[in-house]
Amino acid sequence: MTSSRHLAPGGARTPLHIDSDEPPWTRNDALVTAGACAMNLLSYVFFNDPDGRHDVSVAGFLLVALAAVPLLARRSHPVPALAAVLALDATAALTVPLPTHFGAVLVVALYSVARACPGRVTALAAVATVSLTLLSQANGRIPPWQDVIASPLTTLIVVATALAINRWQQEVAANRRLLADRAVADERRRIARELHDIVAHHITTMQLMAGGARANLAEPEVVRDALVTLESSGRLALREMRQLLDVLRAGDEPETAPSLPQPGVDDLDRLVAESRLAGLPTAFGVTGPQRPLPPTVGLTVFRIAQEALTNTRKHAQAARASVQLTYHQKRVTIEIRDDGGGAPPQEGASAVGSGGHGITGMRERVALHGGTLAVGPQADGGFAVVADLPLPTDEADEAALQHEGARR
């Protein structure tokens, strides 16, 4: 049986929503109902002596048993279940003499309301429980003072117990989330340290060996030893990085289709076309001599443009937008501007359908490359996102070599 429970304002939980094709109770509900019914029946049979005589009738037995039936729906419909229990208890009290008017069935029904409903509903249910219980106890006469005190006191104890358990469960859930977040943070730091070790040791060794081999091309033996070391370091680094990736992918569902290549600056045309089809006229321009970018830089440029355009469509109420990609000698700049007057997205807001994590995600992506990000309203109206990413010379040369190799 599938169900869902939601937290209501003030921390109280709303009733469960049960699928219509499933029964509104579970085996545990049936066991609780049977147990409460048995306790009330035992009390009726063995302690039914309000006037000094033992009087047990079939009608009373059936009414006491019937009063427990609404408990089957105590989780899905706690308030109607309590109302039904009160009505049946009152009917039984007016029909046959009962040893107690606040039995196990009524305790369970009131407890279920206090556990599942907001505070206002719980207070109204408690007042109704005390009032109807006292009226049924009166039965045309003034109830003894013990009953007048016992009913409110019992109601208070039941409600207080339910609220205390609610508070305890919330604290347990909060502590569990904190422990999970701490475990994730510790694992991220461990993986970061291991990645740092891989990059700092193996990749640096590979770079030095490659440089040494190039500087000693006239000495084949030296070049051969350098290439052997380079191959060994590369193989070890690849194995260790694969192990880390296996850790990160643990628990993921296996891919049923090959992964698509990561997008880059060559996909900005497609991104702008999609923005136009979505109803936002978007201009696209490129300034400076175009050249291949490292894959990570290209992916960051694409994700920032994607996030900014998505936020523009969602928040800016813009009539037009523009995307400008500028190639500098040692850096690349991506600018996304609009002429909208809507409220800008809040820091950390995430745009649905994008690959980033809102403005915070864009800042993190840019910070990984040592760049800068400017986000804010423009002096002449609208909103602008400007990211400037440095492009070291060795990375630019490497990207150019990769591009040339791919063309061949």
Image: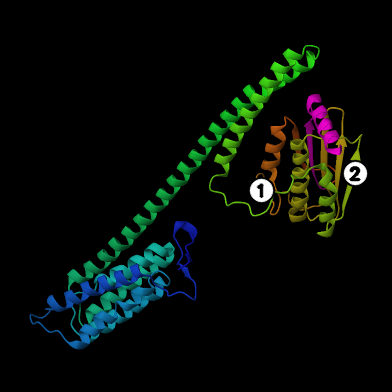
Magenta residues (range):
382-408
Secondary element under disc 2, as helix, strand or loop, is: strand
Q: Nearer the viewer, residue 220 or 233?
A: 220
Q: Is residue 208 something that shows in the picture? A: no
Which residue does the numbered mark 2 point to in the structure image?
A: 285
Query: The N terminus lies in which quarter of the figure?
Result: bottom left
Secondary element under disc 1, as helix, strand or loop, is: loop
Q: Earlier in the sequence, mark 1 or mark 2?
A: 2
Instruction: Name the kind of residue labelled 1 in the image.
Output: Ala
Query: The C terminus lies in which quarter of the figure?
Result: top right
Name the residue at 63% across, 52% down. Answer: 255
Instruction: Please name which of the two marks, 1 or 2, marks the residue nearer to the observer.
Output: 2
User: Total number of numbered labels?
Assistant: 2
In this rendering, would 236 be left or right of 267? left
- Rounded to the nearest angstrom, the CA distance separating label 1 from label 2 is 27 Å
Instruction: Name the kind of residue labelled 2 in the image.
Output: Gly
Which residue does the numbered mark 1 point to in the structure image?
A: 349
Mark 2 surroundings: few (<14), some (14-19) or many (≥20) residues within 10 A: few
**In the rendered image, the vertical position of residue 276 relative to residue 135, given as above or below:** above
Residue 265 picture location, percent across and down: 82, 42
In this rendering, would 195 be left or right of 274? left
Q: Residue 407 occupies which quadrant of the picture?
A: top right
Name the residue at 66% across, 20% down. Answer: 229
Residue 276 picture location, percent across and down: 85, 56
**In the rendered image, the vertical position of residue 140 relative to residue 40, given as above or below:** below
Residue 199 picture location, percent across and down: 64, 26
Q: Hey, which residue is sitting farthest front in the picture?
A: 221
**In the rendered image, the vertical position of residue 379 relative to residue 94, given as above or below:** above
Q: Nearer the viewer, residue 255 or 268?
A: 255
Residue 390 picture location, percent across and down: 78, 29
Name the residue at 42% across, 67% down. Answer: 121
